[in-house]
Amino acid sequence: MIITHFAEADTIKIEKATFAGGCFWCMESPFDEIKGVLSTTSGYTGGNLKNPTYKQVSKGNTGHAEAVEIEYDSKLVNYSQLLTVFWHNIDPTVQNRQFCDVGNQYRSAIFYHNDAQKKLAEESKEKVAKQLNKPIFTEIKTISSFYPAEDYHQDYYKKNPLLYKYYRYRCGRDQRLKEIWRG
């Protein structure tokens, strides 16, 4: 009698998540620290202009938001965990701004890729609203096209650590996050 064993292949299951939380530089680093996140890409989504540039988006009339697209191994990290990281890196109680960045291009949003993500996003938004006991202005929308930002924006926090830290501090991002999420 011959017995054969088939080992299940150690494969990864790559999925995408897309979040807007103000300055995309500030949204890359928290996700890059998560085991199972394979890549983060700064870019633009939510508007109608094809292939927008930073200059166009930063003027605030394209409908696009600065966003981060995350590729992750869903066997190592799940979407709910990514949502928790997202919420704790934004101020969901303000509309069309995040910290010192003002305009609809800096709004907070969850751009879902499928119905399961939509459901989890809506449930998490309700939970955050109850937790903070305030109106939550974060949008939940289906992802349309995602356009990667120019190369100099990618991994900005790694390429320019001093300028990045100075920006975060001057913008009051970390101070406000501590205030909202209590530590």
Image: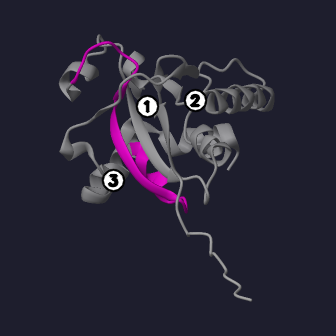
Q: Earlier in the sequence, mark 3 or mark 2?
A: 2
Name the image quarter holding residue 112.
Answer: top right
Residue under numbered circle 2: 114
- Residue at 32% over, 12% down: 48
Q: State the colouring used for the structure image.
A: one colour
Residues packed near mark 3 inside 10 Å, few (<14), some (14 to 19) or many (20 plus): some
**Label 1: element kind:** loop
Q: What stretch is highlighted in magenta?
A: 26-52
Q: Which of 18 and 13 is in front in this view?
A: 13
- Judged left or right of residue 6, residue 37 is left
Q: Which residue is drawn at 61% across and 60% down?
A: 76
Q: Quadrant of residue 53?
A: top left
Foreground tag (3 vs 2): 2
Image coordinates of residue 37 in percent, x first then y, are 49, 56
The residue that disc 1 covers is 22
Image vertical order of residue 62 relative to residue 133, above or below: above
Verify whether residue 31 appears in magenta. Answer: yes
Label 3 to label 2, Cα distance in Å?
A: 30 Å
Of all residues shown, which one is farthest toward the front? 1
27 relative to 7, above or below: above
Residue 64 place in picture, x, y as percent? 35, 19
Look at label 2 and name its amino acid. Answer: Asn
- Confirm whether the magenta stretch covers residue 176: no
Name the amino acid, label 3.
Tyr
Residue 178 is situated, as x and y percent measured from the top left of the image, at 62, 45
At mark 3, the secondary structure is helix
For the residues labelled 1 and 3, the Cα–Cα distance comes to 15 Å
Looking at marks 1 and 3 on the same chain, the residue that comes earlier in the sequence is marked by 1
